[in-house]
Image (cartoon, rainbow, N blue to C red):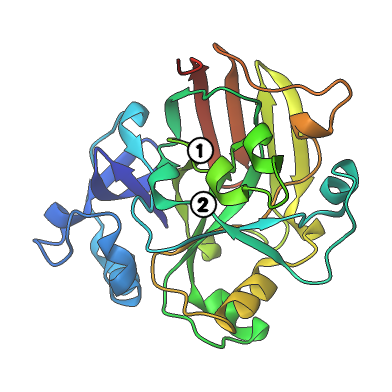
Amino acid sequence: MRIGNIGGRLSVVSGERAWDVEASSGGLFSSDPQAVYSRWAEFSEWASGNLLSQPPSFSRDRLGPPAPRPAQVFAVGLNYRDHAAESGLAVPASPTVFTKFVSAIGPPAGDIILPSGDVDWEVELVVVMGRRARNVPASAAWGYVAGLTVGQDLSERRMQLAGAAPQFSLAKSFPGFAPIGPWLVTPDELDSVDDIEIGCSVNGEPMQKGRTRDLIFPVSDLIAYLSAVLTLLPGDVIFTGTPAGVGQGRSPQRFLAASDELISYAAGIGEMRHRFTGPEP
């Protein structure tokens, strides 16, 4: 099943067509895309047997983030060995966790305004939680996942690395710096949830390409680690880490500029397209 946010309304997507959930359910479920995660099990059961008619087509330029207002947004740094190496850092012994602020969540396509500084790309597989999770063992973790989507952990490197205490969360939370989409794909739709190709390109030039089988801490371990410390809530978002190929790790370094087009993808899920404007005055 593919869950979309079309014009701010919860939808179930099939190819280039989509059911409006509120209309199709006779009001049983709200049109609010974020609200569905607190009723994920009930919604999944309903959707599996009640979407039989041919849905109308939709325009992709109306797609919004499939989890537009998560209570919590987590991100994981240095979760691929090749990215740790290009960063000149040791492979961590435990997940390196930070947050991206919720206001940074953005749609899977459109323009993003560049702030001053050096803005870098980081394509990631993103997890959206479907159940409240506390002290969940890794062996049971996938049962708490609503689905997967594509994300970009956009980062302004000057702010991120300035000072004695780096500003990871702040430098990665400018408006639009956490785009996700194009929709949420449930795990049963994918051949292997632990081996998904992800990548991105800038102006058609490939920049990153990796597979999630190379995650140092796979999705199940991340959920177990986080839920041992805090409570993961339905609809929470987890950026799982980026492979090698970021602009900061290149020689010479390369960063995003006005008019650049960034395309990000995850095989079996879909792609996002963003163009950059600015920088802001």
In this rendering, position of residue 86 left or right of residue 209 = right
224 versus 8 height, above or below: below
| Residue 100: mark in rendering | 2
Residue with the mark numbered 1: 177
Is any part of residue 252 visible from this angle? yes
* Identity of the residue furthest to the left in this view: 26
Q: Tell me the amino acid under the disc marked 2.
A: Lys
Pick the front one: 154 or 168: 168
Secondary element at image label 2: loop
Secondary element at image label 1: loop
In this rendering, position of residue 220 left or right of residue 205 = left
Where residue 92 sits in the image (x, y, percent)? 83, 64
Where residue 13 sits in the image (x, y, percent)? 36, 47
Residue at 51% in and 27% down: 273
Is any part of residue 193 visible from this angle? no
In this rendering, position of residue 216 left or right of residue 11 = right
Residue at 90% in and 45% down: 88
Pick the front one: 170 or 9: 170
Where residue 35 sits in the image (x, y, percent)? 26, 63
Residue at 57% in and 81% down: 229
Q: Disc 1 vs disc 2: Cβ atoms closer than 8 Å? A: yes
Q: Tell me the amino acid under the disc marked 1.
A: Phe
Please tell me in which quadrant of the rendered image residue 96 appears.
Answer: bottom right
Q: Quadrant of the N terminus?
A: bottom left
In this rendering, position of residue 152 left or right of residue 64 = right
127 versus 142 height, above or below: above
* Alpha carbon distance from label 1 to label 2: 9 Å
Please tell me in which quadrant of the rendered image residue 39 appears.
Answer: bottom left
180 versus 272 height, above or below: below
90 versus 171 height, above or below: below
Where residue 134 sits in the image (x, y, percent)? 50, 85
